[in-house]
Image: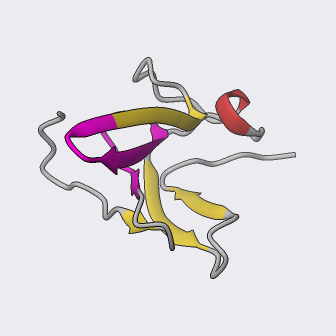
Amino acid sequence: MCACSDPDPAAGTPCTELLDLGPCNPSIAHRHRASVVDLTTTLAGSASGTPAFADGTGTAASFNRPSGVAVSPDGGTLYRGDFETLASG
């Protein structure tokens, strides 16, 4: 559990699962609660807690300061913003 002064919201999927999106750990965790068992899987970013930024799929993606979340109506796609990340090309 992280202690943040500005925790981000979580998003629910149609299957009553929780996507944990706190800014303390720059990753997206999928939590599925079944009975008294709580399973967590990293969906995107790094569970190491090191802020970075890189486009990618799954754990190849990285976040600097994740902010905001949306889940598609069918629950198949997660959209996540990244605050204070600047890139030039």
User: Which of 10 and 64 lies nearest the eye of the viewer?
Assistant: 10
Q: Is the residue 56 above or below the residue 79 in the image? A: above
In the rendered view, tell whether residue 19 sits above or below residue 45: below
- Most extreme residue toward the right is 89
Q: Is residue 75 shown in magenta? A: no
Q: Residue at x 45, y 24 (%)?
A: 47
Residue found at the far front of this picture: 35
Residues drawn in magenta: 18-38
Answer with left or right where residue 55 lies relative to residue 2.
Answer: right
Q: Is 47 placed left or right of 58 in the picture?
A: left
- Among the 4 quarters of the image, the one containing residue 77: bottom right
Indicate the quadrant where residue 37 lies: top left
Q: Is residue 15 above or below residue 32?
A: below
The answer to which of 7 and 41 lies nearer the viewer is 41
| Rendered location of residue 13, percent (x, y) | 49, 68
Left or right relative to 21: residue 58 = right
